[in-house]
Amino acid sequence: MQTHYDVIIVGGRPAGATLAARLGAQGLRVLLLERANFPSAPAASSPIIYSPAMKLLDEIGAPEAEYARGTPRIRRVVAQSKAFAATVPLPPAHGRDYGYAIDRARFDAALWEHARRSPTVEARQGYNVTDLLWKGERVVGIVGHAAKGVEERLTADLVVGADGRFSLVARAVGAAEYDVHNEHSTSLYYAYWRGVQPYDAHGPAAVAYEGGYGYGFLVMDSADGTTAITFEGQAERLNPAPGQVTEFYLDLLRSNPLICKRIEGAEMVTKVHGMRGIGNLYRQPGGAGWALAGDAYHQHDPLDGQGIFNALFSAKALAWAIRDWRRGDKDWDAALAWYDETFRIKTYGMYHRTLAQVRDNLYSPAQLPGWALNGVRWVMEDPAMHDLLGKALTRQLPPEVVTLMTPPVVVGALVRGPLRDIWKRLETLGN
Ligand SMILES: Cc1cc2nc3c(=O)[nH]c(=O)nc-3n(C[C@H](O)[C@H](O)[C@H](O)COP(=O)(O)OP(=O)(O)OC[C@H]3O[C@@H](n4cnc5c(N)ncnc54)[C@H](O)[C@@H]3O)c2cc1C
């Protein structure tokens, strides 16, 4: 077994495994190290993915039949408030008009297996990286060990930290943090259930239910007939006492009559998982002998379900930067600068849109008088609004140009809404 590699990647989930596959396709000798043994779910994530993330997986040939095995296609996202429901169909993009509420254990294991198939990628699971090796100011490798194994020192031209939010690599190199936004931080808790009543008779859905002040629920049809039930809200309000997480979770679910009805007779089949005080930031993309990818590099509130896309895209951009550097087209600093700029162009608008949504929906939700509710309903039920929302979720419109409540959308909706109501009444009378 060799001990010097072109690239050592710490962390083998969406960012690390797909980076390994992309570098393997360039013929680089890659060592991919992961502490967990697959299949294994990550620390916290009850995820939905949309077509742009799947397109990035298509590019590396990761088989949808494996990562989404047994998982129903979700073609609509429903916003269910106490007063009305607005169904947003997912618009076609990249040959798909659907997303998945994936089972992360299955998804991550499929990506790991895919990376492993690359002849120049050596993948070791159950392997804990404990430190970095340095030569002066430069990172030159890692220190680590297999479970119950002896400590090893392995060297590489480049070490990539794809090791998640609490990245050891980022801490060891002292990576600088930028654009940190914790003023509206959220907490999220979820569990998977079996036997949940369907939302309606029209097939799988991701349904966002209005919750109480400062939080909301998301109920998604997931793999093998399970349903993910999640809530997310203001970190300081969703703050269960230690040891009380399950009771807290169940109490909140039972406080909502619509969710209560759906879980009647259903069984919770996993523990309650979650994360408290989810942070938002960018980190320095790299330095001498090291780089970061995925959550280690950029952390984004889960409200919009974009974290996996970001992790996959960072792997793609970093693979290109490494290719240019290895070929001698750019020196390492220029390659890193290009990586950072390319990633920010792709993610910055969505990052700030998500932060604004967290602020507006969870931290300062509008307290509307009763008479204004019809107006909101008309806007939320309007096809022009659905078109914008669907295109924003599937990244067909740059998030920074999607200002959903533009005067033409609102005025159009306020004209069409009452007409739709009249039409519905006439239909009811006709029946
Ligand atoms: C509560 C919550 C809900 C979310 N919901 C969604 C969603 O709906 N849609 C979406 O797209 N995204 C969602 N996300 C975000 C998504 O989970 C992450 O963006 C994604 O997992 C990042 O992938 P990654 O590969 O960068 O890191 P991770 O998935 O965190 O993987 C890092 C890996 O590194 C390994 N590792 C760490 N340290 C070491 C070490 N020292 N040695 C060896 N291995 C190590 C870990 O074991 C881990 O497996 C959510 C996140 C949270 C917290």
Image (tube, helix red, strand yellow):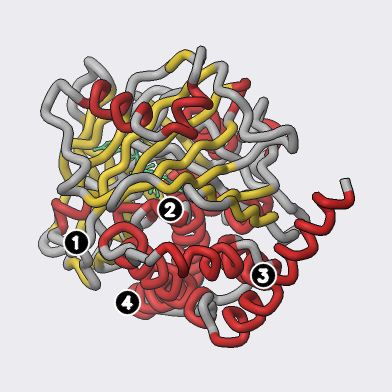
Q: Nearer the viewer, mark 1 or mark 3?
A: 3
**What is the distance, in whole Å, between disc 2 and disc 3 at their CAs?**
35 Å
Amino acid type for the residue under numbered disc 2: Gly
Mark before the other along the chain sequence, 2 or 4: 2
Q: Residue furthest front?
A: 429
- Residue at 12%, 29% (x, y): give it: 241
Q: Residue 417 got which mark?
A: 3
The residue that disc 1 covers is 182
Q: What's under tag 3, amino acid-wise?
A: Gly
Relative to the observer, which residue lies in front, 108 or 4?
Answer: 108
**Where residue 333 is drawn, which disc sits there?**
4
Which label belongs to residue 307? 2
Residue at image coords 48%, 64%: 373
Q: Is residue 81 visible?
A: yes
Is the Cβ of the residue at disc 1 closer than 8 Å to that at disc 2?
no
Q: What is the secondary structure assignment of the residue under circle 2?
A: helix
The location of residue 429, given as percent across then percent down, is 83, 51
Image region (quadrant) for ligand 1: top left
Label 4 within 8 A of ligand 1 by Cβ: no
